Image (cartoon, helix red, strand yellow):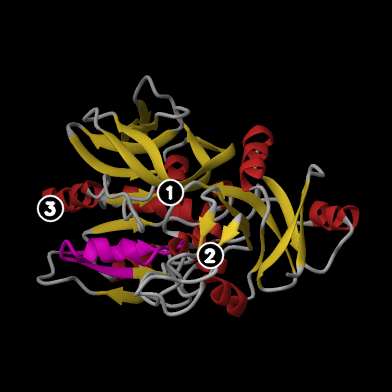
Amino acid sequence: MEPALLVLEDGRVFRGQAYGSPGETFGEAVFATGMTGYQETLTDPSYHRQVVVQTAPHIGNTGVNDEDPESRRIWVAGYVVRDPSRVASSWRAARTLDDDLRDAGIVGISGIDTRALTRHLRDRGAMRVGVSTEETDPQALLGRVLASPPMAGADLTDDVSTPQPYLVPAVGERRFTVAALDLGIKAMTPHRMAERGIEVHVLPARSGLADVLAVEPDGVFFSNGPGDPATADRAVDLLREVLDAELPFFGICFGNQLFGRALGFDTYKLRFGHRGINQPVQDLRTGKVEITAHNHGFAVDAPMDREVDTPYGAARVSHVCLNDEVVEGLELTDGARVRAFSVQYHPEAAAGPHDAAYLFDRFTAMMGER
């Protein structure tokens, strides 16, 4: 097999075999802990410009199908696995994962100790990385890694957002209409709303308040997405206008970070982030613990012990990660009524788990109360 080289920005070197497309790629090295759902991971726009390390050792055994992609293409900058499957054994598979990566031009590496790489990233933090099937000199590749852009300060939503608005119709009778700002939305998210009788108008990231109001929404949704939330001033300004208009709001992941900024909180970069489908989160309102799907490298800096008065009402932390006490949700109240809320994780949960699906019901109930 063709050799491949992986070099981290701190100089750590791993040698393996080419996987996917030959060539060279750069991005932020992150690890994802899911034991399944690799197709959803690869097509999640939130992974734009990231080189994903799969902690599960055996990847590709169910192949790739045409039903599970979360967007129009594979978004990861590179892919790192230990033991790629030699065959695809699912009746749903249309092709192998290796073929899909090659066709999409995604440079990968296999046959390395992904456990050692993951432990290194946990100790040192997420960092820039290069993967190459062309370069054999680690020092030469390291120079190009250090010249590549970091994730902090990256403004990436325009890269992944839809260029034109589109409609996801309600399943059955239409009960509500939602304007969804596409900052890197996954296909399952509007589908989960449609299942609840919501007609979803998915809007480009550059949309303004006039575009939102033009669909006569009962509520507004901000999606997940890649990059540094500190760069998303335009979307934060729009969200403040939405709150001024007293429209019900729901945000996930990147949308949670922008909600935090709109309320006056800061955001910061996590050491190595949360990525995978097995993260424990507690809903502070109910005390319930959920196993949730995550993909974020940034978080909101908000106090856990008190409410904060904002120009829009009282804001408080609603969810917390039980691994490291990172803020995982916010809510804004007007008296006893919740008028806006967000979570840092993915309640659409493709490919699982589904503990947090109730949040779509909470959004639906909030619009009904209005």
What residue sits 9% from the left and 71% below the top? 173
Name which residue lies at 35% across and 58% down.
Answer: 350
Q: Which mark is residue 253?
A: 1
Residue 245, image x and y in percent?
A: 29, 52
Question: Which residue in the protein does label 2 denote?
Answer: 85
Give the foreground label among 3 and 2: 2
Task: Decide which of 180, 1 is in the foreground and name it.
Answer: 1
User: Judging from the image, what secondary structure is the residue with disc 1 in?
Assistant: loop
Residue beneath the point at 35% across and 44% down: 292
Query: Mark 1 or 3, which is nearer the eye?
Result: 1
Q: Is residue 143 left or right of residue 12?
A: right
Q: How far apart are marks 2 and 1 (CA)?
A: 31 Å
Callout 2 crowding tier (Cα within 10 Å): few <14, some 14–19, many ≥20: some
- On the image, the x and y values in percent for residue 257 come to 46, 44
Viewer can see residue 149:
no
Q: In which quarter of the image is residue 308?
A: top left
Query: In front here: 200 or 11?
Result: 11
Q: Is residue 261 visible?
A: yes
As helix, strand or loop, the secondary structure at mark 2 comes to loop
What residue range appears in magenta?
176-201
Outermost residue, left side: 173
Q: Name the residue under label 3.
A: 368
